[in-house]
Image (cartoon, rainbow, N blue to C red):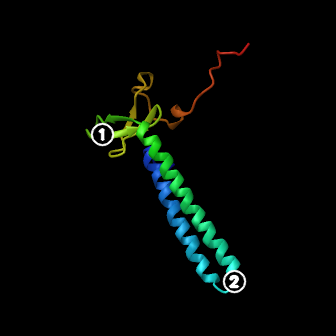
Amino acid sequence: MKPYKNKINRIRSFALSLIFLGVIIMYLGIFFRQNEIIMLIFMVLGLLSIIGSTIVYAWIGTLSTRAVQIICPNCGKATKMLGRVDMCGHCREPLTLDPSLEGKEFDESYNRPTKNKNSVNK
């Protein structure tokens, strides 16, 4: 199992990988200079990947402005937290703002909404 990282950093890493993927796709289009249609397809796909990256960066930027900024008790640095549980962006210390999760083992599934079995719609 791969180690858990801060949500904001994971999304930013995904956006950065979209930029590199778009450049690589566009570079592959250079090998098809003789067939302009295939080269154009590669260039457009690369451009779409870079535009997708821009959209992801804008989305995570808006999420980051609404994220709760807290001071990590382990390293003492300010970090932003999304959801009920998250990791410190600097030292990867598990963090929570929910008192009911205090002292429990870190689990990413705490961020997923769960259906309450006791509530029944009538």
Against 87, is 32 above or below?
Answer: below
Q: Which mark is residue 22?
A: none
Q: Determine the residue positioned at 64% across, 82% down.
A: 32
Label 2: element kind: loop
Q: Position of residue 7 (x, y in %)?
A: 46, 44
The local crowd at label 2, few if under 14, some if 14 to 19, many if 20 or more residues have their Cα within 10 Å, is: few
Against 68, is 45 above or below?
Answer: below
Mark 1 belongs to which amino acid?
Ala
Examine the rendering and report whether any part of residue 102 can be seen. yes
Q: Determine the residue positioned at 60% across, 27% down.
A: 114
Label 1: element kind: strand
On the rendered structure, is 28 left or right of 70? right
Q: Which mark is residue 78?
A: 1
Q: Which mark is residue 35?
A: 2
Specify the quadrant of the image occupied by residue 27.
bottom right
Specify the quadrant of the image occupied by residue 99.
top left
Mark 2 belongs to which amino acid?
Asn
Image quadrant holding the C terminus, namely top right
Q: Determine the residue positioned at 47% across, 34% down.
A: 83
Label 2 vs label 1, nearer the camera? 2
Of 111 and 32, the residue lying toward us: 32
Specify the quadrant of the image occupied by residue 69.
top left
Examine the rendering and report whether any part of residue 5 can be seen. no
The local crowd at label 1, few if under 14, some if 14 to 19, many if 20 or more residues have their Cα within 10 Å, is: some
Q: Measure the C-alpha gap from mark 2 to mark 1.
A: 53 Å
